[in-house]
């Protein structure tokens, strides 16, 4: 089974950068020179502040629109897809592996405590002018430091990144408190928990009662809250998640249709092919030929 993940080195191609053997990367203000037709699963942390233009992406099947002054973040295992972006789209992007940032750090849970590096949270907010200026300046400092030839460069960058993340956490929590008063409620929290359960169980669990039981609610209530928040039924969400994973796997040259069918726990290639064609309009073999 081929790996559907992209590491930092291969992902740099999206920004027109050459591959490099580092466990972190920060852009000066990169535009997207290309984007993959299908999504990919990142195996690193992503921190980004848009400085110009617009883009439409999805993080774990949740679509977001990005424009100047927007911040978003994602954790390893997040499935990312870039649908479109304007010609003038630019973002300051910081990516890093957990092993780099937490090297010599005693409390490995610090990243989770920040709030925006969490599977339960869709980390995407609009920054005010002061917050945007603060975070942009800190990213600029980190970028300049990466160009220096210093004996303790990595340690200094590690410290600067932590400073950036804690400043961001302060802004993020203040923003969420304002939003929570107006919008977030029990249904929002249950929906986020449902999406987390889906990401970890969609290959083996398609029965709504499994997810409803885990959330201590009825299947009927689960259907209603998903419709209220996303406009989709739980079944739609599960099917979309399976289809996106199938596309990821089918795009890998070493995988054949039988391998993908087995990976997604279908009883036969015929059953998988029927499901795939129902939701995409084409067969898995036709999709691979495209």
Image: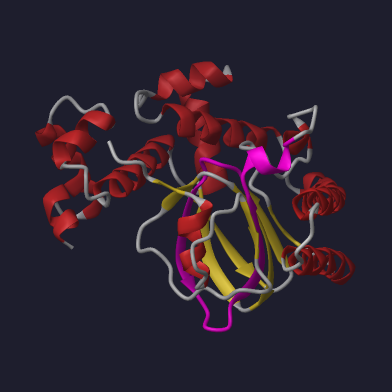
Magenta range: 75-103
Q: Residue at x 67, y 43 (%)?
A: 100
Residue 201 among those drawn in magenta:
no
Query: How many marks are shown on the rendered structure?
Result: 0
Position of residue 215 measured from the top left corner of the image (x, y, whole percent): 57, 21
Instruction: Classify residue 28 by image quadrant.
Output: bottom right
**Residue at the extreme left of the image, as rendered:** 270
Q: Residue at x 44, y 19 (%)?
A: 210
Residue 87 among those drawn in magenta:
yes
**Residue at the extreme bottom of the image, as rendered:** 88
Position of residue 49 measured from the top left corner of the image (x, y, whole percent): 70, 65
Q: Residue at x 26, y 26 (%)?
A: 265
In this rendering, would 237 be left or right of 161? left
Position of residue 213 measured from the top left corner of the image (x, y, whole percent): 50, 16
- Residue toward you, 58 or 229: 58
Instruction: Classify residue 127 by image quadrant.
Output: bottom right
Residue 217 visible at all: no
From this view, report whether residue 283 is shown above or below residue 56.
Answer: above
Position of residue 115 measured from the top left corner of the image (x, y, whole percent): 75, 40
Colour mode of the rendering: secondary structure
In this rendering, would 237 be left or right of 185? left
Quadrant containing the C terminus is: bottom left
From this view, report whether residue 23 is shown above or below residue 2.
Answer: below
Quadrant containing the N terminus is: top left
In this rendering, would 248 be left or right of 111? left
- Residue toward you, 253 or 204: 253
**Residue at the extreme front of the image, as rendered:** 151
- Residue toward you, 104 or 201: 104
Residue 239 visible at all: yes
């Amino acid at each position: 089974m081929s790996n559907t993940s992209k590491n930092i080195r291969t992902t740099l191609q999206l920004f027109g950068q050459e591959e490099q053997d580092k466990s972190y990367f920060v852009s000066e203000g990169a535009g997207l020179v290309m984007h993959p037709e299908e999504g990919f699963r990142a195996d690193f942390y992503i921190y980004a502040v848009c400085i110009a233009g617009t883009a439409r992406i999805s993080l774990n099947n949740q679509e977001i629109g990005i424009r100047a002054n927007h911040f978003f973040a994602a954790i390893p295992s997040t499935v990312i897809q870039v649908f479109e972006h304007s010609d003038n789209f630019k973002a300051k992007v910081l990516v890093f592996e957990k092993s780099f940032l937490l090297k010599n750090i005693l409390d490995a849970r610090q990243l989770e405590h920040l709030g925006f590096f969490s599977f339960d949270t869709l980390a995407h907010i609009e920054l005010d002018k002061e917050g945007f200026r603060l975070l942009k300046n800190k990213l600029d400092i980190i970028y300049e430091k990466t160009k220096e030839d210093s004996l303790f460069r990595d340690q200094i960058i590690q410290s600067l990144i932590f400073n950036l993340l804690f400043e961001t956490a302060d802004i993020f929590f203040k923003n969420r408190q304002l939003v929570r008063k107006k919008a977030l409620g029990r249904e929002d929290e249950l929906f986020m928990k449902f999406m987390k359960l889906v990401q970890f169980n969609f290959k083996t669990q398609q029965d709504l009662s499994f997810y409803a039981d885990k959330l201590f609610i009825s299947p009927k209530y689960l259907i209603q809250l998903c419709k209220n928040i996303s406009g989709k039924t739980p079944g739609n969400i599960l099917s979309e998640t399976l289809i996106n994973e199938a596309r990821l796997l089918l795009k890998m040259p070493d995988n054949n249709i039988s391998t993908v069918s087995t990976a997604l726990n279908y009883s036969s290639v015929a059953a998988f092919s029927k499901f795939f064609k129902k939701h995409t309009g084409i067969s898995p073999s036709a999709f691979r030929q495209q």
